[in-house]
Amino acid sequence: MSATNPALPPALEAASKAAQQALDQHFVETVRWHFSPETGTPFWLNWAKQAGWDPAREVRSFADVVRFPHFDGEALRTEPHESFVPARYKGRPFTIFETSGTTGMPKQRIGWDDYKIDYEQFSATLDDRAFPRGSYWLMIGPTGPRRLRLAIEHLANYRGSSVYFIDLDPRWVKKLLREKLHDQAKAYMSHVIDQAVTILKGRKVEVLFCTPKLLEALAEKISIPGSGIKGVFCGGTSMSPQQLRFLVEEVLEGETQLVPTYGNTLMGLAAHKPLTPADAYSITYHAPQPRAVLRVVDPEKTENVVAYGGWGRVELTALTPEFFMPRFLERDEAVRRLPCERYPWDGVGEVRPFQAEQQKIIEGVY
Amino acid sequence: MTDQPIRIPVLRAGKPYESLEQNEVKDLRTGAVLAVVDQANAGIVRRDLKKQDEHFAALRAIPIAERLRICKRAGELFLRGRLPVGPGCEQGPDEYVQTLSRTSGLSHAMVRANMAKVHTVLDGMDVILRGLTRAMDLSVLDGGFGAQHGVPLGFFPTTRSLGIVLPSNSPGVNSIWIPSLALGVPVVLKPGREEPWTPLRIVQALIAAGMPAQAFSFYPTNHEGSAAILELCGRSLLFGDVAVTQAYARDPRVQIHGPGRSKVVIGEDAIDAWPDYLDLLVDSIAKNGGRSCVNASAILVPRHAEALADALAQRLAAIEPLPPEDPRATLSAFANPRFAESIDAGIEGALKQPGAVEVTAKHRKGARHVVVEGAHYLRPTLVRCQSLQHPLANTEYLFPYASVVELPSSRWLEEMGPSLVVTAITRDKSLQRSIIESPLVERLNLGPAPTTRVDWDQPHEGNLFEFLYARRAIHAEAGW
């Protein structure tokens, strides 16, 4: 993770260095927190006993993250939740969040305030004209055991707003698509969209949260700006530049503002760098650093990041007092992008499903 | 001819649209990029097709008699004109032939033969519509009703547009959808990955000749985009193998154009004269590079299978790859070398099962799969199968390939399965009758005509008029 890059203008170079220092410091503190008996997490304290080194004492900067192996997501399916309760959180009931699209035993992450902090920080990136304070929101997407549902409601509440919810069960959709029951998948999609149209016709809603596919399907029924929607907060699947352009120019009719995001239950959410014409609709996301760090790594040699502009696999490190998760390999690949003014650290561009996984992953409507 | 790639935009009801995603179409020998084809995302297809009524109205504003004149003019333009391909870029006929040959592997002569086929359809559209409508007064289609032989009749269009998901195998397949414009139904085309050239040239010829541009959508797109076309067009033609078409097999709105499994069958009364039919058999198997669904892929005989197979194999084995500009070139190179490799491996694998022997192998110089100046070819292959149940007996491939099976004529119909074209060489009236009455045969040639022979006034694969129109009882009171 290089902090110095000749391509950066001096002011950004300085900001980038400062962000790197802040990350180094945050990393060292977070590792100490999770690996110290008085504050730490049983899972990591046990791990350290067999690791042959003491992370609490030895890490010096974020560069040391590669001393940890890739976090095995299987632990989130099998370990008792208590293993992930840091000592300082003992006795406080926690919320259990599940990853959204899996079948079988889902990955489960426990948490307390992380999602609130993540989304309060994210709120600052929203434009008040498109996401008016005190307005009503509509979320069309996975509710149930998803962090996203609570997070969106918290974000809206934090901005003085309230949310209507239409549930979409992505596990059911994936099952239908896997079994090639396309008619049923279509009928389910219509069922979801019809409910949304009913709310939009009956209530004054100004902000929408949904996936790109649902947004397209909704726009086939009604005009989105014509329904009074000022801002759309979109996430859930990869979006190619052409798909994004189509959403902006046609689905949103060049009027409603689109805020694409990249995130999941483990990461929180990454904000996008505001698009300029030079970006040609290629989206770059920046992790909510230092609380989470995204690296674009060489799939063959995952300790190394790829060069700027190169493709690699997305690797996530979560660094909060509630949750430490080093070097989790996401199912996605992306282009490594330069820091930008608003987010002076590496970005991930044109995120899409990781090649080797492409055969297996069914993105479906979610 | 410069090798600056041509940018081919999407046409959204006639309006060019440049996408942020493109596919490259390459010279199969040198790898040079000859075209950059803009890709439509499925959302674009869905959004545009909400306006089908408008595109339909624009085309219907022109009376059918004028549409027929436009088709005739378009035929001339297609054959000889300079027509737009991309922004600021036109192609004359020679450039079209060369580019298509370089990207598809067809020889120049084969491309020109296909051009002639497309020209025939455009030029003779009135004759084709007479055939499709059984010589109905076509003005019935303008007003919706009229009379024929004193019998009142009315027709209404079943769809506002015809979707066409095209293959890349041969430019000739485009002749199938062209009558749609004359019949007053706009087209929504999804070209094959490697063959944007021909459908685009036909579209541009028709627009230049006076057809309204709104009647043409041209969407190079992915699987999702194809599915959107098939879902939203009231009628569609879908080309592809069984894996592609299976999902639509029961959808009456979708006409499937899958493998033809065309055959030549020779009766007891004619088989002793088998040497007389060798030319016909070679034509049926190898014409147009063996890439058409009307190419024969099985020959059924009651006797003389060994001798016939051997003589035919000698003739087929003499067909060698030649440079594309050689007028004698009858083999086509593969645009995608992986297809050649996998077909070759598939045949070799199936030959290991008992009951099949390749007869061409001993007459051929070298292997079936051959690379000549960077182009991958499969040399013609004839397999003698002991029964129609052998996996090599009743199948077809994208090159001159056929099986020879010895089987009494009494068992043909129960064993041979569906066939797009059957050439039946027999004067046995009872055998002729049983074939004529079989629902498994789409087009039938009686007597020694190659399977590749096509009469344009008789549809060989579904009747487009009956697909696009339905009959209605209609009565108008005097003065109304």
Image (cartoon, rainbow, N blue to C red):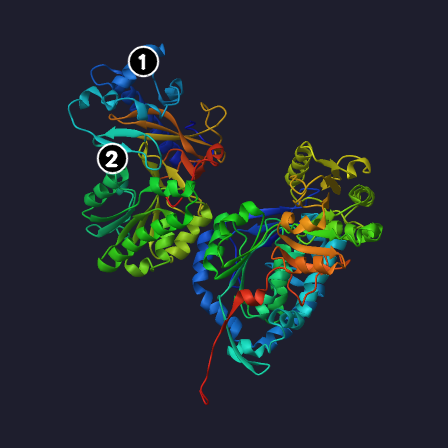
Mark 2 surroundings within 10 Å by alpha-carbon count, few (fewer than 14), some (14 through 19), many (20 or more):
many
Secondary structure of the residue carrying numbered label 1: helix
Q: Are marks 2 and 1 on the same chain?
A: yes
Name the residue: 45% across, 90% down: B479
Position of residue B25 relative to residue A338, above or below, is below
Quadrant of image for the C terminus of chain A: top left
For residue A326, side relative to residue B4 (left or right): left
Residue closest to the far bottom: B479
B168 or B14: which is nearer to us? B168
Q: Position of residue A84 (x, y in %)?
A: 25, 22
Q: Chain of mark 2?
A: A
Position of residue B266 relative to residue B466, above or below, is above
Q: Label for residue A186?
A: none
B220 or A184: which is nearer to us? A184
Residue type at tag 1: Ala
B177 or B41: which is nearer to us? B177
Q: Position of residue B69 (x, y in %)?
A: 64, 75
Q: Which is nearer the N-term, disc 2 or disc 1?
A: 1
Determine which residue is flagged by label 2: A115
Residue type at tag 2: Tyr
Determine which residue is flagged by label 1: A48
Position of residue B130 relative to residue B381, above or below, is below
For residue A65, side relative to residue B114 (left or right): left
Quadrant of image for the N terminus of chain A: top left
Q: Position of residue A300 (x, y in %)?
A: 50, 25
**In the rendered image, which quarter is residue B321 located in?**
top right
**In the rendered image, which quarter is residue A87 located in?**
top left
Question: Is residue B2 among what the camera can see?
Answer: no
Q: Are marks 2 and 1 in contact (CB under 8 Å)?
A: no
